Structure formats: C-alpha cells, structure tokens
Image: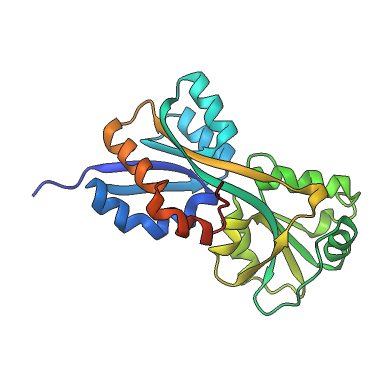
Amino acid sequence: MDAAPVLSLLSAGAAKGLVEALQQRLSAATGARLEARFGAVGAMKEALLGGAPCDVMLSTDAVLEELVASGEVGAAPRAALGRVRTGIAVRDGDSTPAVDTPEALRDALLAADRIYFPDAERSTAGIHFASVLRRLGLREQLAGRLATFPNGATAMREMAAGHDRRPIGCTQVTEIRYTPGVRLVGALPREFELTTLYGAAVAARAADPQRAARFIALLAGEDTRDLRRGGGFELD
C-alpha cells in the first residue's frame, strides 16, 4: 500500500490550536498526512524563504501580502481565519490582576516577579508587547524580569511549568487558550490594543496546489466557525 502524500504546513503559532484540533478531520478530507511546523510569524516567513517544504502558509494578513507580492504564495485561493487579539495571561490558580487600563496593566507588570512573552523581534505579539513596555516606561525597570521565548506557545508553556511566585504573560489570545495551565485575564487595554488578521494561502512550491486549496477551504470554512471562535478567533 502506498504511503499517504504529505501536506506541509508552515504556521504562525496563533493557529496551532486550531490546526491540531482539526488535524485528523483535515487529513481524512484531503487524503494527506499533515506535517505542520509552528512558530513566530517572522520565523515561519524565514523558513519559507529558506526553502523549507511548504504547501500551505498560515500567517498574518500583512505577511501574506508581502509573500504574494514576492511570488512565494499565490494570491488565490486565499482565506481569512479570523482576527486575534493580544492578551494577558496568568497561571491557573493565581490571582487575577486588573489589566483593563494602562495604569492597571502597569501595576500588574510591576507586581510580577517574571514576565513571559514571545520573541520581541520575530513574533507579532512579542514585537507589540515590547513596544507596550516602552510606552509604559517599564522596559529598563523590568529588564531583569523579562523572559522571552521563540513563540507564544513556548512562553505560555514555560510560564505554566515555572515556579515563580507571581508570573504574568502576554501573547496572542489563541495561544493562551490552547495552553494547559494558563488562563486568559483579558485583552490589552484599548490604548495598547492589537488585533491581527490571520489567513492561509497556497505556497508557490506546493506539491499539489489543488490539495492545498482544499485544505484551506476546509480550515477556513463554515464548519469550523464555532471552533475558530471558541479558540479565540474573532469572526466578522
């Protein structure tokens, strides 16, 4: 019996929970074995440009636009998955700080003994959170408490497993929701709000563009709306 064909996916970490929840269904529907690689948006873009196997690219809409312009992914078919807010997290069982105003967020960060967030140069949430720290005037003051990781999923996993007395974290809401041991406190205050549109596109080097297009249609279709919404994607 011939082995099932492989469908290679490069995906922003924000979509990891969605892809993993649908993996068996998507594999059955497309007849392919899914090989997915997840990470910071910048890192996945670098992987694609470096020649990593890729049939489908899941990334921010802004990055997909760049990749369409450079010919690395096709302009169509392409589908939106939904918008994702950047949020604040704590460990399960820890007290819930107020984070709904800049002043409250500042107090919560100052009270934390460790602050977890993703790569401040290549991840969407990490880049933004670093700017929030600067706008609050806390970047230098909290430098010794900052713990950055390659992506939001790793940052949340490490926070959940850590032994800090009072940790706090920031990343995409979807990454918070699919990580055991942490819980969402809320989105960043309105003044610092970041809502990012994520989508999927067929890579220019896709081994089977039709299969890749079918995968995207299933991932972003009507049948997954409730799952996407429950995982933290906001749908228009």
Task: Answer with left or right where residue 153 lies relative to residue 113.
Answer: left
Q: What residue do we see at 32% from left, 48% from top?
A: 34
Nearest the camera: 162 or 66? 66
Task: Answer with left or right where residue 83 lies relative to residue 140.
Answer: left
Q: What residue do we see at 61% from left, 54% from top?
A: 152
Q: What residue do we see at 85% from left, 49% from top?
A: 139
Q: Where 167 sits versus 4, above or below? A: below
Quadrant in the rendering for residue 121: top right
Residue extending farthest to the top is: 70
Task: Find residue 86 and report its horizontal and vertical position in percent.
Answer: 68, 52
Residue extending farthest to the left is: 1
Task: Answer with left or right where residue 59 lies relative to residue 88.
Answer: left
Task: Find residue 133 and report its horizontal and vertical position in percent.
Answer: 83, 49
Task: Find residue 127 and report its horizontal and vertical position in percent.
Answer: 71, 42
Task: Answer with left or right where residue 172 lies relative to residue 28.
Answer: right
Residue 149 seen in render: no
Quadrant in the rendering for residue 111: bottom right
Quadrant in the rendering for residue 173: bottom right
